[in-house]
Amino acid sequence: MKERVTQTHSKPLWLLVFLFAILGIVLFYGLRPGKGLATLYFLSKDNSSYIAEKRNIPFSGTPEERAQALFDEILLGPQSRNASPLFKGPARLASILDRGGRLHADIRLSSLSDLAVDIDIVKKALAKSLERSLPGAGTLELYVNGAHIPNGLPGL
C-alpha cells in the first residue's frame, strides 16, 4: 500500500479570504453615505462677527447634493446659544446648480424683511461655510427669490 502525500495550498486560500475582506469593506463603506465634519458660519448675537459651528453632515452624491446637505443645515439655524440665524423668518433652498466652477444657490424667503442682516453679510457667511466644508465646490453665486445677488440687494 502506498501512502499519499497531500500538500495544502494555503496561499491561494489566504489570498481569496483577503480579497473577500476587501470586497466586504468596499461594499459596507461604499454604499453608506459618508459623514463629513462641516464648519457652518452664523452671526454673533449682536451681528458683529461670525461664529463657526462644527457639525457632522452626511455628504454623498453629486456636488449639488453635497452642497444641498450643507445649506439645509445652515437653514436650520445655529445650535449654539451664542449665535443667531442668518434669516429671521422661514427660508428654504429652492435650487442649487454646479456650473463651470460656480455654485448657483437660490434661497426663497417669504419677504426680504426675513433677512437678519445685510445680504452681503449673509452671502459671506454662506460662502465661508461652503469654502470651509466643501473645498473645491466653486464660487458661490447667490440668488434670493430668483434674483441674482452679485453685491447686495437693490433697494435695501
Image: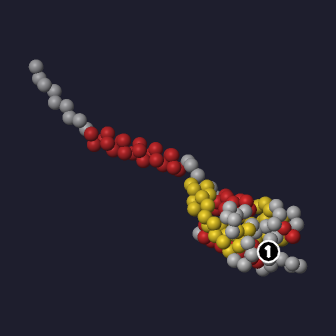
Residue at the extreme left of the image, as rendered: 1
Residue 64 visible? The answer is no
Residue in the image at 78% along x and 80% along y: 151
Residue 3 sits above or below residue 98 on the image: above
The quarter holding residue 5 reads top left
**Helix, strand or loop at disc 1?**
loop
Q: Which residue is mark 1?
A: 117
The quarter holding residue 54 reads bottom right
Asked whether 39 or 145 is in front, the reply is: 39
Residue in the image at 60% along x and 58% along y: 56
Asked whether 148 or 1 is in front, the reply is: 148
Asked whether 137 or 43 is in front, the reply is: 43
Q: Amino acid at mark 1?
A: Val
57 with respect to 7 (left or right): right
Asked whether 29 or 92 is in front, the reply is: 92
Q: How is the image coloured?
A: secondary structure
Residue 111 visible? The answer is yes
- Report the quarter where the N terminus lies: top left
Residue in the image at 51% along x and 49% along y: 29
Residue in the image at 25% along x and 38% along y: 9
Residue 108 location in percent, x, y? 82, 63
The quarter holding residue 156 reads bottom right
